[in-house]
């Protein structure tokens, strides 16, 4: 039987994962009030793991916790969203540049396999998961743990905006071309080309995310 502390940690991770998924999928739209008592009842736990999960989500930029007001699903202005993409470009290009020399034939084949799945995926949520996995594999060999953690947090913060405007049939040809160009540049160890392609790719995503701010599904 696992120690009680392990069970508590597992429960906390499960609550955190469930809330993160609900927020990034849009099930909990920006501005939604997150009441600890109600969430504790929903998950069948005390308020402590719920409070810890909300604090973790705040550190990821998905939740805002304000004194005397409680916790809310974060919403952003166009300026804030643009700033997050500026950070994504800086961090993801840096991670890619460090990853390129470390990529192997095996790691590149994993990326190519993910791209083939993306080409045929029709479910939006699964498509977004595969796209995230593609980029995770692309940057993984960088071994820059803190940078990768920051990238994951920023991506989570903006992903729900992308979900309302990006999907399997959104820019499928352009998306595929950019991914294929990235793979080719990494194979060629062409850091400059890979960096330029990734920057363009992220800026295209930024435009779709900004457009989604005017969508009713993402209004606070």
Image (cartoon, helix red, strand yellow):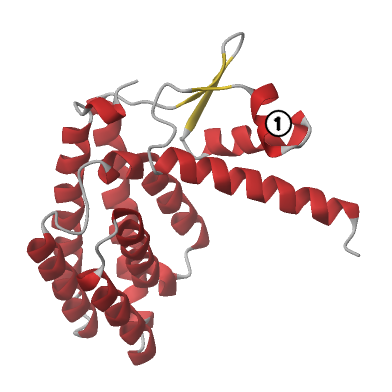
Residue 213 % position (x, y)? 23, 29
Residue at horizontal 33%, vertical 80%? 101
Q: Secondary structure at mark 1?
A: helix
Q: Nearer the viewer, residue 81 or 122?
A: 122
Where does label 1 land, which residue?
40
Label 1: few (<14), some (14–19) or many (≥20) C-alpha neighbours in 10 Å: some
Residue 151 % position (x, y)? 40, 52
Number of numbered discs: 1
Residue 17 % position (x, y)? 57, 48
Q: Nearer the viewer, residue 201 or 114?
A: 114
Q: Find residue 168 and report its image quarter.
A: bottom left
Horizontal relation, residue 37 to residue 121: left or right: right
Residue 134 % position (x, y)? 33, 68
Query: Which quadrant is the C terminus positioned in?
Result: top left
Residue at horizontal 31%, vertical 83%? 108
Q: Find residue 161 and report its image quarter.
A: top left
Tell me if residue 26 comes above or below residue 95 in the rendering. above
Horizontal relation, residue 79 to residue 110: left or right: left
Q: Find residue 106 and report its image quarter.
A: bottom left
Residue at horizontal 90%, vertical 58%? 3
Residue furthest bottom in the image: 105
Horizontal relation, residue 25 to residue 43: left or right: left
Q: Nearer the viewer, residue 74 or 117?
A: 117
Query: Which quadrant is the N terminus positioned in?
Result: bottom right
Residue furthest top in the image: 68
Tell me if residue 60 comes above or below residue 99 in the rendering. above
Residue at horizontal 28%, vertical 33%? 81
């Amino acid at each position: 039987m696992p120690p009680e502390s392990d069970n508590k940690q597992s429960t906390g991770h499960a609550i955190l994962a469930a809330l993160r998924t609900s927020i990034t999928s849009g099930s909990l739209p920006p501005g939604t009030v997150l009441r600890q008592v109600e969430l504790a009842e929903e998950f069948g736990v005390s308020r402590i793991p719920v409070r810890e999960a909300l604090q973790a989500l705040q550190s990821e930029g998905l939740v805002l916790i304000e004194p005397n007001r409680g916790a809310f699903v974060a919403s952003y202005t166009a300026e804030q969203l643009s700033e997050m993409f500026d950070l994504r470009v800086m961090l993801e290009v840096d991670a890619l540049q460090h990853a390129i020399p470390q990529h192997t034939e095996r790691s590149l084949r994993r990326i190519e396999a993910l791209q083939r799945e993306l080409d045929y995926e029709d479910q939006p949520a699964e498509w977004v998961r595969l796209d995230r996995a593609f980029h995770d594999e692309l940057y993984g060999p960088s071994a820059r743990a803190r940078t990768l953690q920051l990238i994951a947090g920023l991506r989570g913060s903006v992903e729900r905006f992308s979900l309302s405007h990006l999907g399997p049939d959104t820019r499928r040809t352009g998306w595929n071309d950019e991914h294929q160009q990235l793979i080719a540049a990494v194979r060629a160890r062409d850091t400059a080309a890979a960096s330029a392609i990734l920057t363009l790719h992220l800026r295209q995503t930024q435009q779709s995310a900004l457009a989604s701010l005017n969508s009713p599904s993402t209004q606070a």
